[in-house]
Image (cartoon, helix red, strand yellow):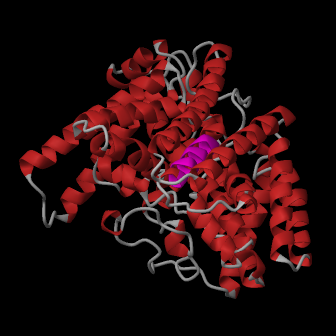
Amino acid sequence: MNFTSWEFIGLFLPCIVVLFYLLKSQTHRQYLLIVSSLVFYAYSGFENCLVLVFSIIANLLAGSILSQLDTSKKQPRLAVLWISIAINIACLLGFKWIALIDGNGAGFRIEDDILIPLALSFITFQQIGFVYGCYTKQIKQVNKLNYLFFIAFFPQLVMGPIVRYQDINRQLDSGRLGNVSWDNISIGVSIFVFGLAKKVLLADRLYSPIEQVFSTAEVSTFDMWFAIFAFQLQLFLDFSAYADMAIGLAKIFNIDLPLNFDRPFKARDRFDLWRRWHISFAIFMRTHVFVPLVRKARIKAEIALVITALLSGLWHGLGITFVIWGGIQALIMLLTHYHKKWSGPSLSPSKLKIVGAIALTFLVNSLIGIVFRTPELEGLGTVYESLFVWNDTHTILTSRAWALFLLAAFVIWLLPDTHQIFYKYWTATDLRPLNNRPPGVAKKSWISFDSSIPWALVFSLLVLACVMSIDNSGRFIYVQF
């Protein structure tokens, strides 16, 4: 069930909210959200729900065993950990392999069909994080009802952010579901509408001119540059819109989800970009792949970085373009690392240098994005040739396409981010270490939301515009992963 569908907005969500507020017991409310989340997931296919249930049972069993086994029993605990991880990875790789065959080897897909069980990649990572937490005794006791909620909670079920059991368990144990208010609804709905507008008014409308360029046999160099830049804007607006909507939906029920985007296109280098883009995924890969490789396996940091980047590509899909994309990520991060090491830190860069670094990072990201966006290896050469071999074929883009591009650029670079606009009410958690956060998260900006008539009018207009456009809304891009 898509967040932008009438089934969700007009039926599912209102019914769940009304039932939630009619129930008074936190336990009853928790059961309601678990059952409704499973119904939400089963809407994508009952067979998908069977995979989810199997995954929940297997990992709950593993976590319960690990939390009960004494730490002195190292070998049995290691065996349970690795068996659980192997089952999770085998399940994910098995379905991705089937998808690779069904998709005829294609990587990125524009079709609406999803070739793996919905949200399997996100669910797998959450389960691995849970089992590892039980192994390290960060999770000392497993509450089965809280665990079901942690996995199934529908706002973050499909595309994250990747949450930690400890964070959800702590909120539930503190009685969050029992301490709800109309303020939760108003702020949650406002954040949801903001994300909805980014999705249906910008990301979805950018899709058509981008796809038109990529699907045309011969296009002008000018048009191809438009397409690769616009695709980056579309990808960010689409994915961050989901994150906003998920945070807003969770807020309605007084649950805080992690921040997943922090102005990524204001990043000054590749490492800075990964501190800002899909934050929960980057934190997971660092915690569960990079750090163990360096500290436990004693692998050099550079090699561990390459392995982590390649695995991040494989997480998106087994297509060869995703593997190449991961390899290029590793190469650029290594070059960035050595450049910083040799040149030393720039203590007070000028504004011109900062703007130049941001522009260069976006340019490089756009050029790499071609590998991510192109479904098959054969198409890469064609795209890069269109970019660097001048072709003055008549443009196929309209003035409307350029207007959308400029509006998207304005929203991304000149308007404050969601957490800045809602800074007064922002309660989403930040998984990044304190010394690894760019300044300005949930801080006052030149535009800030409050409960006032002008903002009520703004959101009324946004809702009206979304209602008029929602029938043409497509699936979220990251659903396919």
Can residue 400 be seen by looking at this rendering?
no
At 65% from the left and 21% from the top, the residue drawn is 99
Residue reaching furthest to the bottom? 452
Say which of 285 and 375 sits in front: 285
At 27% from the left and 32% from the top, the residue drawn is 331
Q: How many marks?
A: 0
Q: Is residue 11 above or below residue 171?
A: above
Say which of 132 and 177 sits in front: 132
Say which of 260 and 471 sits in front: 260
Q: Is residue 92 above or below residue 71?
A: above
Left or right? Give the position of 204 relative to 222: right
Magenta-span inclusion, residue 306: no
Can residue 182 be seen by looking at this rendering?
yes
At 74% from the left and 53% from the top, the residue drawn is 152
Left or right? Give the position of 10 relative to 188: right
Q: What stretch of residues is rendered in magenta?
A: 122-134
x, y (%) of residue 113?
74, 28
Left or right? Give the position of 208 relative to 292: right
x, y (%) of residue 362?
35, 45
x, y (%) of residue 341?
11, 47
At 20% from the left and 37% from the top, the residue drawn is 335
